[in-house]
Image (spheres, rainbow, N blue to C red):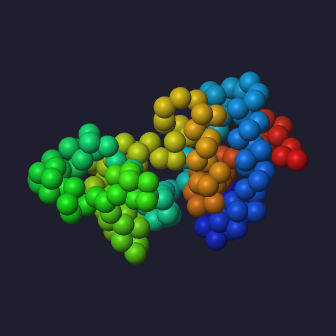
Amino acid sequence: MLTDLVQIRRLGEQKREENFRLRAHLKRHDHSDRRLRRLAEEIEAQIDCTLCANCCRVPEVGITDRDVEKLSKFYGVTPQEFHRDYTERNETNELILKRTEAGCVFLSGNLCTVYEARPRNCATFPHLIRGDGSIASRMWAMVDRAAYCPIVYNWMEAAKQDLGFRGR
């Protein structure tokens, strides 16, 4: 199990084209979503996300009105105050949580300060075990995530082996 973030970044970038081919392979061939999900569960159980927190450092976190309602109640502020203090729009005008130099505005060290009320997007990350649709339908984001998330990187490598995927 690879957990070194420097190696994961290097290898994730190195295997980018191969991972795009895996994504295409999953979309074109029948596979057991249950088996792929079980692989993800096994890998996720072996990795302590609080030792990494790259999911809070690297990507933007898109949020919904429901997330804003839950978080504003958690903080004891109005949704308008929450929007003003904790959200912003990205380049594509998507509503996201504000970011600091360290990542998500709610990240403290490697811990989430709003964990109990965190957005759905955060609660289901890395979207292998939990998420809408099949794993193949969520693969569009996995190639990028394989370069910063130990769970995704290790899952992609395990999935290649399990599927007999050669990548070339």
Say which residue appears at 57% left-offset and 38% top-offset: 138
Count every numbered label the image shows and give the total. Answer: 0
Residue 144 lies, in percent from the top left, at 61, 55
State which quadrant residue 160 falls in: top right
Q: In the orientation shown, which residue stands out farthest toward the front?
A: 92
Say which residue appears at 24% left-offset and 47% top-offset: 68
Side of 90 where 151 appears, left or right: right
Side of 15 where 87 appears, left or right: left
Residue 167 makes an appearance in the image: yes
Residue 166 lies, in percent from the top left, at 86, 44
State which quadrant residue 137 falls in: top right
Residue 61 lies, in percent from the top left, at 40, 54
Side of 31 where 111 appears, left or right: left
Residue 159 makes an appearance in the image: no
State which quadrant residue 9 falls in: bottom right
Side of 56 where 145 appears, left or right: right
Say which residue appears at 59% left-offset and 54% top-offset: 145
Q: In the orientation shown, which residue stands out farthest toward the bottom?
A: 101
Residue 98 lies, in percent from the top left, at 33, 63
Q: Which quarter of the rendered picture does the N terminus lie within?
A: bottom right
Say which residue appears at 38% left-offset and 51% top-offset: 94
Q: From the viewer's side, name the closer residue of 15 and 46.
A: 15
